[in-house]
Image: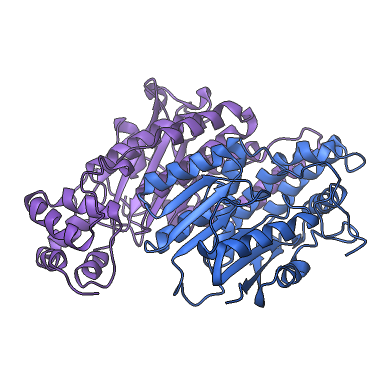
Chain colours: A blue, B purple
Amino acid sequence: MSTSSSDIPGRKIRFVADTESGETMTWLLNFDKIVNNGMRGTLAERPDFSGIKAILDLACGPGGWVLEVAREHPEIEVTGVDISESMIRFAKAQAISRGYGNARFMVMDVKQPLRFEEASFDLVNVRSLFGVMGPGEWPQLLAECKRILRPGGIIRLTELEVPVTTSQALNELWDITARAFYKTGRSFSVDGRHIGITPVLKRLLRDAGFQDVKHQGHVMDISAGTADFEGFWRNFVYVFELVKPFMLKIEGLTTEQEYERLYQHMQAEMLASDFCGLWTYVTVWGEKPR
Amino acid sequence: MEATAWRKLLENIIADAQERQRIANELGVNPATLVRWARGETNPRHENLQRLLKALPAQQQTLTRLLTEEFPTFDMLAGEDMSEQIPEEIYSRILNTYVNTRDAQRSWYMSDLIMQLALGQLDPNHLGMAIIIAHCMPPSRVAHKVRSLRQNAGRGTPPWNTYLDQELLFLGIESLAGYAVSVGHLVAVQSRAEQTQMSVRWEEWEESAVASPILLGGRVAGCLIVSSTQPDYFLEFRQKLIGQYTELLTLAFRSEEFYAYQDIELSLMPSQEIQNPRFSRFRQGVSDVLREAFREQRPITAREAEHIVWVDLEAELLGLPVSYHSQTV
């Protein structure tokens, strides 16, 4: 990976959309739904939750995954942490409104030491951090995860790659995204043509000292006529609007006129009855040595 | 798990099937869940223990004593049940989203956010619920009256799909929503057996339903429709919650989308079987309108394109001879 884009020294990598806005929150609530559905459950790779009493979800956003686990498993304590105070307040309010006393939420920056004692959790879940973490930032986070997991505890990472679709505009918007991440030091890709994180996930876990590392792929059908099409379509309508300011700030990436044209065409092309697309997610997991 | 004393007491109480369903509805859980608690197979959440006490006022004292034997940390004085009202934080977040979202996108974000929150609170244990928003169509070109509501946004928990936006339908005076809009207040139908003034068209899994008109200063923009798989699910506190979420939904509409009552004269709309084939190419139709707009270099939003397709479809359906209408309405 020596030729991959490196972190930009002295600049902290932040989320690509405004974490305090209600639009981002609405997008993330919807995103959690399509990913939970697409992966067929909260912990699809496990036959059951036996031996798990305490779970931590890092960068939980508005809490979609945490709330789903809390609903399914009243006996498990699920904690979500996120850097955004408003996300956490909102996630707490949702837990209260649903009467899920086993869901807890705390404000915490995953790039700082995690404020939990050693061996506090049986499972740590991390999803879609690809836009927030530079390659150089992963080792510290994974070391922290290992510290707060009990021996035999499980770390679980889920990340995505660009979708492959019949919409030229959607493909181009993802191409711009991949290049934007490459140019701003968020990418594991060697040339900016992919997000590039999924192939390296297992190595990251092994390098951090986890053992028995495995992976599972999830291929989501985002084509016209599928049950969750509306969710995927909204996801792209939301996200490419929300990240637009970030994209336009990057020199030589795109122009406002071009971006707007692609955004409009993407909507028309996705709504066509012959629109087809597959979107790949990869989950990897490993165990802290006993 | 041993069947402790409180579980035996519960077992006796829920031996009566009607009482079992009543308690399950109060708690918003499946009746089978109560049976599992009684058998000692699973443990209830503390929130549900509090609700159980509330649902059984006559046995409250005994039950409290027996519960503390098994759950010493159980606090029966934990205060009011917060899940019976919309938390302040949710109100403030919704208002914040309203204020900070651009005009063109506001309606989408607001309705999406509010539907997801309402569904989470009204069906926290996934017993099965559908939440649908129906919009008043603009006054027809001929009679200049609102003739129907269009149903095109919804969220559900199983057995319904997560997204119900593809279940497109025009609703007229024959529907529960149409009736609620005409009378101007929330209407609940608690079971299929209930006699009503309208002929409610029940969906496969639907056992009870509420329609709550979206009103602003005496004008109406549409209706929130909530369906449950459970009979008698819409207890007073849930109806109140639906009323509050309906109030919030006024934020998803522009002021010109609210119509005065004298401008509303709902028609009898054709049955779903007649309507369905016309919606099969709805999205393609929206796509075509969008593409045509680009070609003519007057780009419009997907919302605006949808609107054009809806108006054309309504005109087509309203022009149908009466014999096409369903026999049942």
Q: Nearer the viewer, residue A242 or A250?
A: A250
Residue A265, above or below A164? above
Looking at the image, which residue sits at the far bottom?
A212
Which residue sits furthest left? B58
Residue A18 visible in image: yes
Residue beneath the point at 57% across and 61% down: A148
Asked whether the viewer can see residue B311, the reply is no
Q: Residue furthest front?
A: A118
Give the total of numbered labels: 0
Tell me if A11 is positioned left or right of A105 in this view: right
- Please indicate whether residue B127 sits to the left or right of residue A41 in the image: left
Return the x and y of residue B272 as percentages of the image width and height.
Answer: 43, 54
Q: Residue at x 46, y 54 (%)?
A: A67
The quadrant of the picture occupied by the N terminus of chain B is: bottom left
Which quadrant holds residue A286?
Answer: bottom right
Q: Considering depth in this image, is B285 or A25 the residue closer to the camera?
A: A25
For the point 63% across and 46% down, the residue is A109
Q: Is residue B313 left or right of residue A277?
A: left
* Residue B80 spot, x, y in % from top left: 25, 40
Looking at the picture, does residue A140 appear above or below residue B122?
below
Above/below status of B79 relative to B272? above
Left or right for B312, reference A159: left
**Rendering coords of residue A176 (x, y %):** 84, 49
